[in-house]
Amino acid sequence: MNAMAGNYTTEDGREIGDVMMEMKNITLRFGGVVAIKDISFDIHEGEIRAIIGPNGAGKSSMLNVISGFYHPQDGEVWFHGAKRPQMKPYQVAKQGIARTFQNIALFEGMSVLDNVMTGRLTHMKQGMLAQAIWRGPAEREEVENREVVEKIIDFLEIQHIRKTPVGRLPYGLKKRVELARALAAEPKLLLLDEPMAGMNVEEKEDMSRYILDTNDEFGTTIALIEHDMGVVMDLSDRVVVMDYGQKIGDGTPDEVRNNQAVIDAYLGVSHD
């Protein structure tokens, strides 16, 4: 199931669309260190695509390339059939790509509601003066954006903390608020960087459900990095595996699970 050109049907009967994003021969260097070496893979519309690998494999670097934080020295990023020029993160966000971070990046002193509202920035058209006066178009825009945010708050079941400062929340709820902020951007492609990190079993089950529901109810395409292999195999339609900056596997969860190179990378086994 590598490098599929068109749509496909998952094992559970879901129809997956055509290619949304293609990473073509991506190489990323930091001085003399090669973080990503000549990696190609694609992401289809409507799928959940996992990127996995041991620590230091280059997974977060790849997510940073997709989201515009890093710019590869070699290779091309294609989005919806067009080669993407070098872009800043805010320009990538305007294309419809949102993300969460491995280390939570929220405004601790602001309420949950205000944090989630920041996810609407790419949808705000009125200037600062109009927003300050808050009449006419600016008022209507504010109301429309708040309606979207309130629906997401309901969807993620965080109504009871909507006015609570984020800094007072436990870790698991902070991760959910960060997901809410990303969803507020109404992304075409949602990037999740270790969404389950640091969570207990119950919190992981909740987050897994929200990710599946986001994909199912909103039709959001998702690419995620995750270390919990049980979660990866349960959630993902396809998995790409990285090790020391190189791609060593790509396919369905079953194909990856039985890939000897993947087994060796995770178990630390070498074969002559």
Image (cartoon, rainbow, N blue to C red):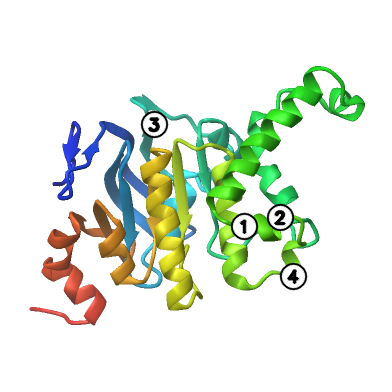
How far is disc 4 from disc 1 in space, using C-alphas?
14 Å
Q: Which residue is mark 1?
A: 158
Q: Quadrant of residue 22?
A: top left
Q: Earlier in the sequence, mark 4 or mark 3?
A: 3
Q: Which residue is mark 3?
A: 79
Position of 27 with respect to 144 (left or right) is left
**Proximity of marks 4 and 3: CB atoms separated by less than 8 Å:** no
What residue is drawn where x is 43% and y is 39%?
Answer: 218
Residue 152's spot in the image, x, y percent?
58, 45
**Proximity of marks 2 and 1: CB atoms separated by less than 8 Å:** yes
Q: Which mark is residue 162?
A: 2
How far is disc 4 from disc 3 in space, using C-alphas?
39 Å
Residue 80's spot in the image, x, y percent?
36, 27
**Proximity of marks 2 and 3: CB atoms separated by less than 8 Å:** no
Q: Earlier in the sequence, mark 4 or mark 1?
A: 1
Q: Is residue 30 above or below residue 229?
A: above
Q: Which residue is mark 4?
A: 168
